[in-house]
Image: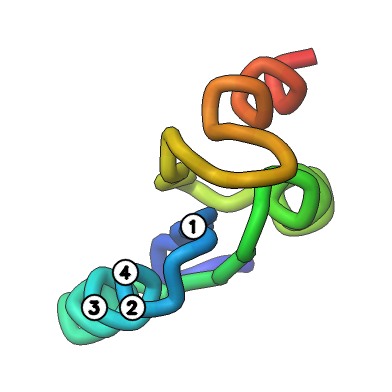
Amino acid sequence: MAGKIHILMIDDDSLMRRLFGAQLVKEGYEVIYAIDGNEGREAARRLQPDLILIDYRMPVMDGMQAASRMKE
């Protein structure tokens, strides 16, 4: 993934993903989306984005749990 800055956005709220994602794309960033902590962890491992934006409150695995597991 060279060139653009890649941002992984992990959020279970589709409206938030659309609103924030659209603004980031408009600013020239490449945005990758995940709908929960598990999917986000896998995307982060596989794609190694430059920045991860993660929602704190999500079902299945909250943002703190996902971030802790990504650090492992």
Instruction: Specify the quadrant of the image occupied by residue 45.
Output: top right
Query: How many angstroms separate mark 1 from mark 4 (CA)?
Result: 7 Å
Q: In this view, does 28 lie to the left or right of 54?
A: left
* Tag 1 secondary structure: loop
Q: Mark 3 points at which residue?
A: 19
Q: What residue type is labelled 3?
A: Leu
Q: Where is residue 16 in the image (x, y as percent from the top left)?
A: 31, 69
Circles 2, 3 touching at the beta carbon (< 8 Å): yes
Q: Which amino acid does label 2 sit on?
A: Leu
Give yes or no for contact between labels 1 and 4 (Cβ–Cβ under 8 Å): yes
Mark 2 or 3, which is nearer the eye? 2
| Marks 4,2: beta carbons within 8 A | yes
Count of labels in the image: 4
C-alpha separation, residue under disc 2 versus residue under disc 1: 9 Å
Q: How far is mark 3 from mark 4, CA to CA? A: 5 Å
Dot 3 falls on a residue whose secondary structure is: helix
How many angstroms separate mark 4 from mark 2 (CA)? 4 Å
Mark 3 and mark 1: Cα distance apart in space: 12 Å
> To which residue does mark 1 refer?
11
Q: Which mark is residue 15?
A: 2
**CB atoms of marks 3 and 4 within 8 Å:** yes
- Tell me the quadrant of the picture where the C terminus can be found: top right
Structure colour scheme: rainbow
Q: What element carries label 4?
A: helix
Amino acid of disc 4: Met
Q: Residue 3 placed where, x, y %? A: 46, 71
